[in-house]
Amino acid sequence: MESIGTLAGGIAHDFNNILFPILGYAEMLLEDIPEDSPFKDSLKGIYTSALRAKGLVKQILTFSRQDTNELKLMKMQPVVKEALKLIRSTIPTTIEIKQDINADCGVIKADPTQIHQIVMNLATNAYHAMEETGGDLKVSLKEMEFGILDLINPNMAPGIYACLIVSDTGVGMDKSLTDKIFDPFFTTKAIGKGTGMGLSVVHGIVTAMGGAIHVYSEPGKGTQFHVYLPVGKSLSEKQVTNSKTQIQGGTEQVLLVDDEEAILTMEKRMLERLGYQVTSRTSSLEALEAFRASPDKFDLVITDMAMPNMPGDKLSAELIKIRYDIPILLCTGFSETMSEEKALSLGIKGFLFKPIVIKDLAHKIREVLDGN
C-alpha cells in the first residue's frame, strides 16, 4: 500500500504538469471566443473534463494519504445528477437508470469530488452486475432520522442523515460475498473489469465522514447499497450563490520559474493577460542570477517546487537572502516534503497546487502582493 502511495504521488506530479497547459489554454480560449461561436461547447467540454481529471488526481492523492480534503457544506443533489449523467453516457441502453432525488434532502459536510466518486463506484458496480442481462439501475436520495437504537455502527451519532440508495436488478450476492466486498483488492470481476479498490475507497470516505454504508443482496434478486451521511446544520447564502467575482490583475514585474517549457509559456501568457510584466526562466540557477543582477526590479517571484539542481524552496531561501522582503509564490503538482505551513515558515508568502486556474492564480497574486 505504501508503494502504491509513492507511485500515486509521482503520477500525480507528472499528470498535473500535463493538465496545467490543457486547463490554462482552454480557459483563455473560452474567454477569447465569442458567445455564439460553434466551438464554445467543445471548449467547455475540454475544460470540464480537465477539471474532472484534476479532481481525479486529488482522489488518487487522497487514497494514498497525501492530500488533505477541503470539506465544505454542500447539497448532494447536483453532484449525484452529474455523476448519473456521466454514467448514462458510458453504459449500454439495455440498462435503464431511474432516479428519485429528493430536492429537500439537506446539506452535508463533504468534498464534492468524493461524493462524485461514491456515486460513480456504486453505479459502476451495479452496471457490472447487469452487464449481460440488462436491468434497472435505481438511485434515490432522501433524509432519514436515526435514534440511538437505529445506528448501524458505533462511528455514527444520533441525528438526521442523507440516505443515498443505489440498487440494481442484477445477479446479486450471497452472504459470504457481501461480508468481503469492502476489503481492499477483493473483486468478483474478471481481469480488466476492476481492481477491487472501489468499494474499499467508498467505505473509507463514508466512515471518515461519520457515516455508514450497508449492503442488502440475494443471489438472483439484485443488490442495494445504502449510504448514510450526516446532514449539516445549514448552507449560508454566501455558499449557495456562486457569484462571478471580477478577476483582478496588476502591472507589477514578475520573475516566473518552471523547468517545463510548456507550462512556462502558458503561465507567462496567463500573467501577461492579467497585465503583469513577466521575466521567465526554465532554470533555478538562471533565475537566481537574473534576480541577483537586479533584485529591486522584481515585485514577485513565482516558482515551481520540483526543479532540477535547485528545488523551489531552496531557490526561495537564496532569493530571501538577497532581498528579505521579496514576495514568493510557490507552486507544486505534488510534494511529500512541502506543505503550505512549511512554505510560510520559510518566508514564502503563498502556496498553490497545480494545475491552477486563472481565477485562483490572480487572486493569490493579489493576496500576496497586497498583503506585502
Image: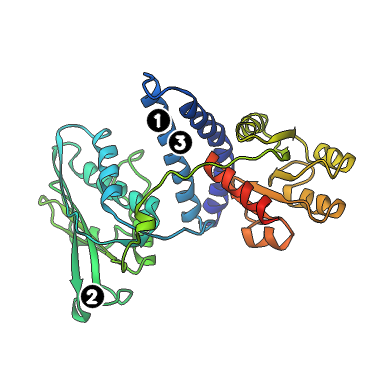
Nearer to us of marks 1 and 3 is 1
Total numbered circles: 3
Residue shown at the point (39%, 25%) measured from the top left = 35
Residue at (50, 42) in percent of width and height: 246
Q: Nearer the viewer, residue 45 or 27?
A: 27
Is 302 on the left-hand or right-hand side of 169?
right
Q: Is residue 299 above or below residue 281?
A: below
Which element is circle 3 on?
helix
- What colour scheme does the image use? rainbow
Counting from the top left corner in percent of width and height, residue 200 is at 36, 57
* Amino acid type, mark 3: Ala
- Which quadrant would residue 257 be assigned to in this image? top right
3 or 2: mark nearer the eye: 3
Q: Amino acid at mark 2?
A: Leu
Determine the CA span between mark 3 and mark 2. Answer: 40 Å
Which quadrant of the figure contains the C terminus? bottom right
Q: Is residue 345 visible?
A: yes
Q: Secondary structure at mark 2?
A: loop
Q: Label 1: which residue? A: 44
The numbered dot on residue 151 is: 2
Chain-order first, disc 1 or disc 2: 1
Question: In x, y percent, where is residue 147?
Answer: 20, 78
Find disc 3 in the rendering and name its residue: 50
The percent coordinates of residue 359 (x first, y second) are 52, 42
